[in-house]
Image (tube, grey):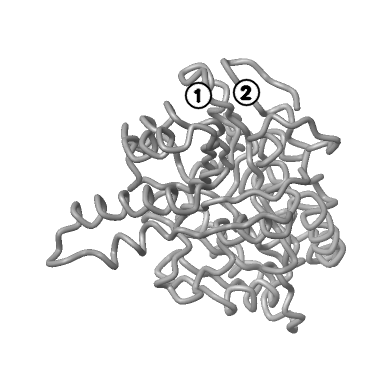
Amino acid sequence: MNESLKILHCANFSNLKYGEVYYSMDRKISYGLIQNGHLVYDFSYRDIAKAQRFLGFKKRSIQKMNQDLINTCRNLKPDILLLGKCELINSETIKKIKDNNKDIKIIQWYVDFISNEKENFFSKFEYIDLFLQSTATELEKLSIRYPNVIFSYLPNISDPAFDKNQNLEKEYDILYIARDNKEDNRCKFAKLLNDFSKKENLKLKMYGSLGNPLVFGSKYYDEISKSRIAINFNREDNLETFNKTKILGTSDRMNHFMGTGTCTFSPKILDLDKLYKGNEHVVYFENTEDCFRKIKEILLNKNYEMIGQNGRKRSYSISNAKRITKFILELGSNQKTVENYEWKEYIFKNGKRITI
């Protein structure tokens, strides 16, 4: 796409966290769009709503923020309105924006759990042209329910501008970071991992689980860089066998690990090997027993260095911000592409796969 576009990117951006999560997808996406030569105007919808809250009237501040988005679109007249999660943006706002600018494209990207969303979230699909999410599990079903929308898988981004190895001395054998909810599978996995590490006399560093604090900002990458192995385990992953219903779904934490060059472990995920090959770019495991056996094996033969470096090169190559945002814009404009995107079979409309 050679034409320079005006893009209004309405997403979280977490400005009021003062750099704690500077590596989040919203900033990576804006960065990639700029790399591709486009004008990007960031609209931090949650921060704008919070700034206008008076005497605790949350509903009124959200209404004002929605009107601010309409006014920003009127002033900027963007070619594309790009939405992040945007749970506070209502469908009436999107309709008014469309009414004011008939040629605008509405694109939404999503990295959360769509099954948890309320009806207001789905009502916006009446006006959205393209919806992308970081799992392919529900795409086909969604495309049947909302036949006018293109639904696509969206890989999480690894980018050298964000995901940098800090070249620190290795202090830990294993790093585990997760926001567990007491007795969900992540908490159970953390307990098993903790017991295994003690038994095998391995150095385990844990954040966010079993009462340990979370870690943010540059320290987050320091801790990843200090570890030989980092394990990505998500709330929908199973302990006894891999989740056979999950397709290409993983958290962006996995790409932070890989982009930093740390040997990354992940439960087996259907078709994720189209992006990252097992034992070459990442280590997949079938269950906890398989995970612990492979940890011992890789620490013993020291293949963690080779896998970590291979994973970093691969993720930088196929999942960098410029390439991912190029894909978003090509798909959103129905433009044919010469790129052989590894996930291209997971693009649907009207319940059918479409080609690009």
Mark 1 and mark 2: span between their CA atoms? 9 Å
User: Is 61 on the left-hand or right-hand side of 95?
Assistant: left
Q: Report the residue at 72% width, 56% height from top.
A: 37
Q: Are marks 1 and 2 in contact (CB under 8 Å)?
A: yes
In the depicted structure, whether residue 73 falls above or below residue 228: above
First along the sequence among labels 1 and 2: 1
Task: Look at mark 1 in the image and give the residue it sits on.
Answer: 142
For the image shown, how many numbered marks are present on the structure? Answer: 2
In the depicted structure, whether residue 51 falls above or below residue 356: below
Q: Which amino acid does label 1 sit on?
A: Leu
User: Is 255 on the left-hand or right-hand side of 177?
Assistant: right
Q: Report the residue at 52% width, 68% height from top.
A: 21
Please tell me whether mark 1 sits on a helix, a strand or a loop: helix
Residue 330, image x and y in percent?
71, 37
User: Is 50 on the left-hand or right-hand side of 320?
Assistant: left
User: Is 307 on the left-hand or right-hand side of 187?
Assistant: right
Which residue is more in the foreground, 165 or 325?
A: 325
Q: What residue type is labelled 2?
A: Phe
Which residue is more in the foreground, 322 or 94?
A: 94
Q: Report the residue at 67% width, 54% height from top.
A: 38
Which image quarter: residue 166? bottom right
Residue 12, image x and y in percent?
44, 58
Task: Look at mark 2 in the image and give the residue it sits on.
Answer: 348
- Tell me the quadrant of the picture where the N terminus can be found: top right
Residue 292 can be seen in this image: no
Of all residues shown, which one is farthest toward the bottom?
A: 169
